[in-house]
Image: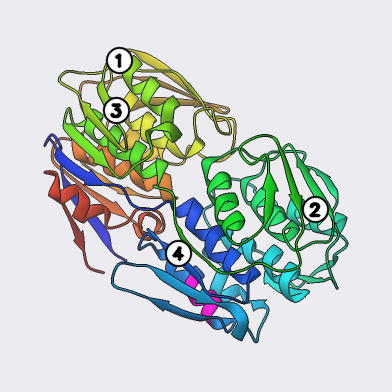
Amino acid sequence: MEKLLISGGKPLKGEVRISGAKNSVLPILAASLLSDEEVIIGNVPHLQDVTTTISLLTEMGATLSIDEKMKVSINSSSMKSFYAPYEMVKTMRASILVLGPLLAHFGIAKVSLPGGCAIGSRPVNLHIEGLKAMGANIKVEDGYIIAKAKRLKGAKISLPIATVTGTENLMMAATLASGKTVIKNAAKEPEIIDLANCLRLMGASIEGDGTSDITIIGVKKLSGCNYDVLPDRIETATFLVAAAITKGNLTLTHTRPDTIKVIINKLRKAGAQILIKNDSINIEVKSQLNAVNIITNPYPDFPTDMQAQFIALNSISKGKSKVVESVFENRFMHVQELVRMGADIEINGNTAIIKGVKGLTGAPVMATDLRASASLILAGLVAKGETIVDRIYHIDRGYECIEEKLTKIGASIKRLPQ
């Protein structure tokens, strides 16, 4: 199993180009199943989850090509299978996103219950109940969701929680349903808007994306399109924290500052100097920052996907802080690894209480999920001595060329072979 070896203590300086958003490209790849025409997707990040999704679409019979700039062309008119096997999707919860498009376009789907990071229960029953409300016949057998529908019908769907993938799946399914679908308590994330923008370019009728009520008027068919994916706000925020934790000076380009206002505000409150200009962000930190309190909640509040990185930052900041995890019930597994590096953190239920220490010390640590991986790399960048991060296959699921990007801005980090 590959590992990352980090020698800490070097401030990061320079420029980083931000990649396309993982959480946008996966649903947009799935959306290509809604059309018989070619869908071309640009700004695609080179990630393990993207590779898995592309393999899945190819396995089902879609015609697919990728150019040297990672622009992906997909045509699903050649589809011959509507089956997403467990072996293909066990590592990735986003695989559930093919369910709605397959059912809406082809009237049939057999999709394995998904796998992915072990960060708490993320039930797919909301996807299933929503599709049933639209007239689908669905049963779950032997770990598979088996769904059929002649043509889905518009419905009013009230989600008990604002699920991102649930909103995306139902929105995609509704584009080809007969009549009007209203999704109440919809997720508001920028990636929802990105998917809606792509679907509109394909001919879908969607209003209200980015709010809690999304209305979709179904159409008979969707066309192809050429669409560039949104920049990744979590990668952007992670590199901002990397600059902050190492007292560096970074400029992040090809990003969308408007999607991470809450992160920028927290870093400024901590004492970072941040300058925003169009699609770039400059951050400079000259002295130890102040710890900041955090409560994670769905967008536009503080994202759960940045909780681990800020715990790493708070662990060496001045003062005492509280981080409350309100989204997932099992997302503090990185804390015990940070404690091994000298952090002073206590867990009380869904709250981490952090007392800032003068410094961290390198140690062998193990990543438990994607964002935990990022927090351990951040800790390693500032720790005295060497840190070895194990189980880094998690990081490859969500950060494009992480060690190459960090090396270019002054980090001492290299991948150790298996």
- In this view, the residue farthest toward the top is 319
Name the disc covering residue 290, or none: 1
- Bounds of the magenta segment: 54-58
Q: Which tag, 1 or 4, sits closer to the chain's start?
A: 4
Q: Which one is earlier in the sequence, the residue at label 3 or at label 1?
A: 3
The mark closer to the camera, 3 or 2, is: 3
136 displayed left or right of 175: right
How far apart marks 3 and 4 lie (CA) works out to 27 Å
Q: Foreground: 240 or 69?
A: 69
Residue tagged 2: 130
Marks 3 and 2, how far apart at CA = 40 Å
Q: CA distance from mark 4 to mark 2?
A: 28 Å
Q: Main secondary structure of the magenta part?
A: helix
The residue beneath circle 4 is 41
Q: Is residue 413 left or right of residue 148?
A: left
Q: Amino acid at mark 3?
A: Ile
Of the numbered discs 4 and 2, the one sitting upstream in the chain is: 4
In percent of the image, x 53 and y 29: which residue is there? Answer: 296
Q: Is residue 55 magenta?
A: yes
Query: How far, Cα to Cα, is label 3 from label 1?
Result: 21 Å
Q: Amino acid at mark 4?
A: Ile
